[in-house]
Amino acid sequence: MNNPSAHSPQADPILKVRHLRQYFPIKGSRDSVHAVDDLSFDVQRGEILGLVGESGCGKTTTGRSIIKLYEATGGYIEFNGNPIFNGKKGRRKVLRDRAFQTEKAKKRLATVRDELVLARPQEKAAIEQKYNQQIAQEDQDLAKFTEDYNAFVDSCPEANPTADQMARMQMIFQDPISSLNPRMTVREIIAEGMIIQGEKDEKLISERVNQALERVGLVRSHANRYPHEFSGGQRQRVGIARAVVMQPDMIIADEPVSALDVSVQAQVLNLLNELSEELSLSIIFIAHNLSVVKYFSDRIAVMYFGKMVELCSSDELFHCPLHPYTKSLLSAIPYPDPVYEKTRKRINYNPQLEHDYLFDKPELREIVPGHFVYCNQAEAQVYEAETKAKSLYYHPLAEEV
């Protein structure tokens, strides 16, 4: 529980996330899907943090858990200095799941031990000693995890966020069609949050709705139309207006341009950039297109199977990727240069072949200041050597501003 946690060195972040977990039970099984597994990071005021990874890696679940559309299983979330989730309700579930994972790990170690003994009977004593020690170590790790996690949860302050506090965090959804109620006018859609907050002054509501429409590039007359009367890009602008009308401090943008044409994507990204500067917004920008994220983000976090595998500045990720999964993602980015495309080699990532975590367990480690990678001790030494030798992966997007 005492890993570096990818905390930013700056003081007073707008969002603190510590050991966030989101588990979904599998029907008919003691096991569960670890959609988000032990994520820790900060978001500074005015910062844009890009969250990338392939479909199903837990990006959207992370955003929905932070904004409390999902009740997180465990961890601690603090927004604007106010605890909004402390993980005490899910403590038993986290510890029970960890005990079950330990049981699975011990069975896996015992299976490997027995197979090796059959294959190399002359080394039976040495093999059994090595694996029996590791099986015993799993129990010790479980005991330490239980102690540390209980101490962590007990140290978390009580979380009882008010509606006003949560209203300062808003979300832009991926699908601009399904996220808008087709039976409501644009005015009703944008004003709904204000009405829920208790605003009753119709004149003030109309004025703020009109201001929000103009701010996102629409006109006041659009307020009386229905969502089906707009194009995809205009619908997404309505979704952005619905978020900014609440005067938020932070926005979670869940793949806001993935359903739009390329030309419209650029317009929406420029709009979000302008709003971020004009309103001093912090943004968590969720996407799977690294080209878009590099253009838009200050820092980038790469997720794989619920874990954060790399976190660093946008420029450094393209100049100096360390985790093999990050290199795999970068190698998949097409580039409009026939010479480069002719020689571009796709890097495949297979975690079973890339990593050996049977004995040396991984955690998020700071390789160089501000650059975190999910790796074990042996891999960390290799990554440190790579950064010193500058034998790094190169992508032409690294040179673009």
Image (spheres, rainbow, N blue to C red):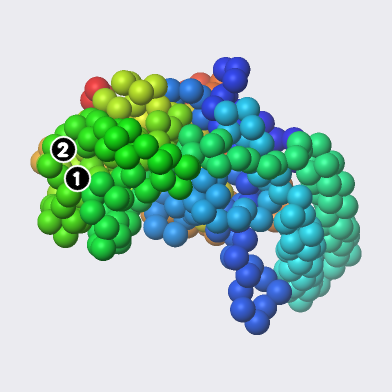
Name the residue at 76% across, 50% down: 88
Q: Which amino acid does the dot numbered 1 rest on? A: Ala
Quadrant housing the N terminus: top right
State if disc 1 and disc 2 touch (CB < 8 Å): yes
- Determine which quarter of the picture holds residue 238: top left
Judge whether 12 appears above or below 311 on screen: above
In space, the residues marked 2 and 1 are separated at their CA atoms by: 6 Å
State the image quarter where residue 164 is shown. Answer: top right
Instruction: Look at label 2 and name its amino acid.
Output: Arg
Comparing 274 with 94, the one in front is 274
Q: Tell me residue 119's x, y (percent).
A: 72, 73
Residue 223 - label: 1
- Circle count: 2
Structural crowding at the residue carrying mark 1, measured as other residues with C-alpha within 10 Å and reported as few (<14), some (14–19) or many (≥20):
some
Residue nearest the observer in this picture, 239 or 276: 239
Element type where label 2 sits in the image: helix
Q: Which residue is mark 2?
A: 220
